[in-house]
Amino acid sequence: MTGTVINIDRVVKRFGTFTALHEVSLDIAENEFFTLLGPSGCGKTTLLRCIAGFEPVSGGQIRLHGEDIAPLPPFKRPVNTVFQHYALFPHMTVLENVMFGLQRLGWSVVDAEGRAKQALELVHLSQFLKRRPGQLSGGQQQRVALARALAPEPKVLLLDEPLSALDLKLRQAVRMELKQIQRETGIAFVFVTHDQEEALTMSDRIAVMSDGHVQQIGAPREIYEAPANRFVADFIGETNLIEVPVLGISDGMAEVSLPGGGTLRCPTPLSRAVGQGILSLRPERIDLCPASEADLTVIATDQVYLGTDIQLKAQLEGGQEMTIRLQNAEATRLPERGTQVGLRLEAGAARLLSA
Amino acid sequence: MAAMAPGGASSSEIYKGNASRLLLPTWVVIGVFLLVPVALMATYSFLTKEFRGGVIWEFSLAAYDQFFLDRGLFGDEPPKIEWTYITIFWRSIWQAGLATILCLLIGFPTAWFIATRDARMRTVWLLVVTVPYWVNLLIRTVSMKFLIRDEGPLNAMLLWSGLIDQPLGLINTNLAVQLGLFYSYLPFMVLPIYAAVERYDFALSEAAADLYAGRWTTLRLVILPVVKPGIIAGCILVFVPSLGAFLAPDLLGGAKSFMIGSLIEEQFKGAAGNWPFGAAAAMILMTIVMIVLLVYARSQTREAKA
């Protein structure tokens, strides 16, 4: 990995008696598409606003290339923000909006105009220079906001759920484009979202947050396949969480006993044995099999047709519900409701987490 | 969304069809209470005066002649420009202009302060600003007179505190009229600006700060232009009634503070009045106001096109 652009060091943010960020620490590398992911109220936007300077931190340091910027007002920080609802200046044209930051930095009108036009070209909006934001569609406004924030070539670009106001089709198209612009410009992006699909598709690395804590930082694949805890496993993708007795743990592998007898060896982030653990089973890595070869036996209760997939609902011994995702192939044979089904856990299906 | 569009369009069609009928009450009110009186006044300004007030139905330009031209005491000298009334008008315009600026300087921060409180406190502050307006303007102006006169509490307090050793002599000055106008019309400045600031999206200020603009630059380049409609509305709402005000100049100002409103009022009051002349002065005042508003409207449409 290349050098660190932003080093967030034990940042605390309190609003009155409520603590929004509990000693959050993380590093953002140059050139990186870094995502802060979490449910609403997890502190991701607060952290972004602390980096931008809109919220003073209650403790800790935010270093930009080693220099603490936490005491600086926002207009002295070489970072720019794409706001959730764009916050374009309604009384200015598209071009004037994009020139705004450059002119504040002391650029001449001619130079600022040249750079602004480049930035607008980057987001494919060169034909609307003289329009006002009110005359543009949501997607176009979003591009203006992006061009405006990119024009001064910030060290870091902060994006606060910039896609949430777009409709689904547009959102998917813009995702790839954002990622491409990030690669082209080489500017580190810090992207805030609650949408895990967005995070997984665009990010180099993701920080999963909840309740003001960073739960896990890692590449999308790592976060999905090796969640550090129950929250991450549950928040990213679908999973079945089953409470199981733990027989032993060594070298990152755990031995657990499954409902209905039988034992299973699976990876775990835990280092020492615990009495009870939570077994996370990814529904798409479970397959049907004859009862004789099964890791787990369940009773089929219901099925949901999803098009590409078919979701099978089943009941474990002991009554717990679980979900299995089967590919909707022609050969797929679905069990009758109420019949016993054998399940085979494929590699990477199971992971033991602390209860 | 797409599926809802036709429904929305057809319902707006329904409202369009009703528009003329829905506007009927408005037209009646405007007609009866605005157009008819103005037409009446315009007519009166071209009639001959009756000495005990009222008019004789005989066409005459005497009122306008009296306003603009000086033909000597007996009316037999060659006409010169009559400066008396033009001076009164000019004084009124700058008094009203000054009052507007004063209201803006105090009103904008006030409106900003109120609009940035939380919702409950906003209501309280708005109430505080508007409560004085539940009292009749005459009573408020008279009270102002009592407050600022030489023997009044303001001077008494300043004398007692030792800040001054003789009364300020505020009463019967242009400054007193200013104070009166300012106090009379301040809410008309505060309320429209408040409405504009309340709608202001503070993310715009954050965006400006994010793009390297300091506080004053943000105020100048983002906040003021965005809330400008509220400021303009406030200025018009203060300037226009200030221009025609007669209570404040009458009660607080001296002979040197005589304003259009008092001039017009005098023409319709008592036996010394001159209705056609009063009507002519009112027409001229209205023309000035209309010109100001039209020039403003023009500049706005030009700006919107640019």
Image: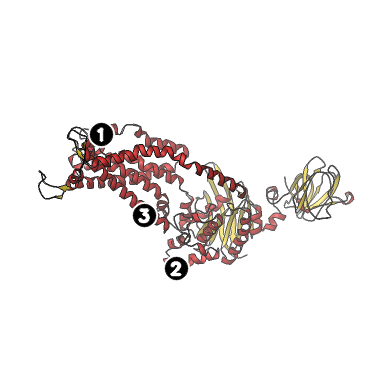
Residue located beneath label 3 in the image: B299
Element assignment for label 1: helix
- The chain letter under disc 2 is A
Q: Amino acid at mark 3?
A: Ser
Residue located beneath label 1 in the image: B147
Disc 3 or 1, which lies upstream in sequence?
1
Q: Is residue A27 left or right of residue B149?
A: right
- The chain letter under disc 3 is B
List x then y, in percent, for residue A196: 65, 53
Q: Callout 3: few (<14), some (14-19), or many (20+) C-alpha neighbours within 10 Å?
A: few
- The chain letter under disc 1 is B
**Against B254, is A175 above or below?**
below
Task: Tell me the quarter of the image containing the C terminus of chain B.
Answer: bottom left
Q: Is residue A45 left or right of residue A252?
A: left
Q: Amino acid at mark 2?
A: Asp
List x then y, in percent, for residue B218: 42, 54
Q: Is residue B102 left or right of residue A42?
A: left
